[in-house]
Structures are given as C-alpha cells and as structure tokens.
Amino acid sequence: MNDTFQSTKGYVASRQLLDSVNVAIALQKPLLIKGEPGTGKTMLAEAVAQSLGKRLIVWNIKSTTKAQDGLYLYDTIQRLYDGQFGEEGVDDISRYIRLGKLGEAFAADEQAVLLIDEIDKADLEFPNDLLWELDQMEFYIHETKRTVKAKHRPIVIITSNAEKELPDAFLRRCIFHYIDFPDEELMEEIVRAHFPQVEETLLREAMAAFYEIRSFRDVRKKPSTSELIDWIRALQIGGIAPDRIRSQLPFLGVIVKKDEDLETIRHKV
C-alpha cells in the first residue's frame, strides 16, 4: 500500500499541498488546512484516504460541538429506558458507551484518516480541550474506568474557515497549510480531471470569464473552484456555444450567488 499522498483522479493538489500532507504524515502531526471557500479543504481528506487506501472518518463540527462528543457518549437515557422495561445487562455500563469520531479513529484496527471539519465553528476552548488526546493518542472513560489508546495513530486533517483565531498552543502542534486559489494552469488541470473530454474553446472561454469575474474588486463573494466546475457542467448540458460565454454569461447564477454581485457584473461586462 502506498504511504505517500498523491493527487487522485478527482483531486489535483499543488506540489506545496502534497508536500504539506506528506510532512504531516511523516511527523505524525495534525494538518491544519485553511483557504477560501471552494478550494477543496474538505475534499482533501477524501483524496488522502483514497490515495492511501484508508478509511475516512468525518467529524463535522458545529457551534454546539464539545470535545467530549468526539471521544465517547454515555447513553444514560437508553440505560434508564432499558431498566424500566427489565432489559438484561443494565448493570453493564459498557453497553451504553458509544465512541465518538475520535474514539472510532483510535479504535480502528487499521490506520484511518480523521477529518475534523470546520474546527473554528466550535467555541474557543474546543481546540485546547483536544490537546491531550491529539498529543497522547488516548482518553479515559470515567464511567468504566478504562483508557482507550489508539491502536494506530490516525492521519488527522483539520479544516478552518478562519471564523475564529485558534489558540497558539493548538497551532504549535499542527502542520499548517493555506490552500491558495489555483492559478489558471492548475485550474485547467483540476477542470480536466472532472471533464477529460471538455471542448477546448469552451474551457478557454469559461475560464477567461471566470477569472475576469474574480478580478472585479466590487464582487463580494468571488466564485470558487467548485462553482466553476458546476458552471462548465451547466454550459455543456445547455449546449452553449463558446462564443456566447463571455458576451452573455449564461447560467450566471451558477457561479454568482449574491444580488449585488449580479448587478456589479452585469454593469461591468
């Protein structure tokens, strides 16, 4: 099995991103990924798992998520319910312990890829509350007095949209990479990975229009890579002639999502 991350058929990574992933794997440190929306932060973990032939475990973080949620849950309600109805084994607390996503990664029989997605959505203490577990690769279950140790240290990928500053103590333990928005050469590789048979003229005209829209200073939400891919798909399905793309901007709502941006673009083009 390959132990070096490489671009996959559906995910084209820059040389710098490939190096960051592989350094994080070699040093056994979490990889913290930032970048503007639509640059493939979440998809990176899927690509790493696919490239290395490993299971992907996803922990989606919300504003209400606590670090404990990723370790384990003691289902007291189910135990109470079973006790009321005379179920056997109620005295065995271990039956009511459910591992969280981090716990699943620790308990996996083979090394897994763990994605902690959008860590900055949680409260400020959330990253610090995970320091021990990510450092020592273990946690303690108080109800059963058992320590869960990682059978294999997972490959941990953490994404952030920079909504909040992350604590310095947490940052020191991570390898950091900012995914720059792809230049036109890399973007062409990405598009061709999704559309190997794309018509040359359509691709050229769509990309020219796309980067022109991104260059407008007044556009508040600049279109992303994923939106360009959706737009090219829409242009293909609609049978749009390439010479109409820049002059008419068909299906503009696929790549522009704010009213004021639509008005800005229509006045400039």
Image (cartoon, grey):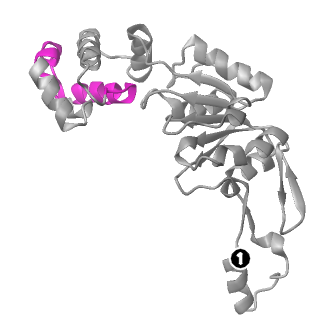
Q: Where is residue 94 in the image (x, y as percent from the top left)?
A: 82, 69
Q: Residue 32 at what x, y percent from top left?
A: 62, 30
Q: Residues within 10 Å of mark 1 (few under 14, many from 20)?
A: few
In the structure shown, which secondary structural element does the residue marked by tag 1 occupy?
helix
Q: Nearer the viewer, residue 221 or 98?
A: 221
Q: Which residues are drawn in magenta?
A: 222-250
**In the image, 154: left or right of 218?**
right
Q: Does the magenta stretch include residue 240?
A: yes
At label 1, which amino acid type do we have?
Answer: Thr
- Asked which quadrant contains residue 206, the reply is top left
Q: Can see residue 235?
A: yes
Q: In percent of the image, x 52 and y 39: which residue is there?
A: 164
Does residue 191 belong to the magenta stretch? no
Q: Residue 246 appears in which quarter of the rendering?
A: top left
Label the magenta part by its dominant secondary structure: helix
Residue 269 visible, this orientation: no
Quadrant (top left/top right/bottom left/bottom right) for the C terminus: top left
Q: Where is residue 168 in the image (x, y as percent from the top left)?
A: 68, 33
The residue positioned 71% from the left and 76% from the top of the image is: 76
The residue beneath circle 1 is 76
Q: How many marks?
A: 1
| Apparent side of residue 141 relative to residue 183 in the rendered image (left or right) | right
Query: What residue is drawn where x is 39% and y is 19%?
Result: 191
Quadrant location, the N terminus: top right
| 136 over 63 or under it: above or below | above
Q: In this view, does 221 lie to the left or right of 53?
A: left
Q: Which residue is drawn at 62% across and 42% down?
A: 116
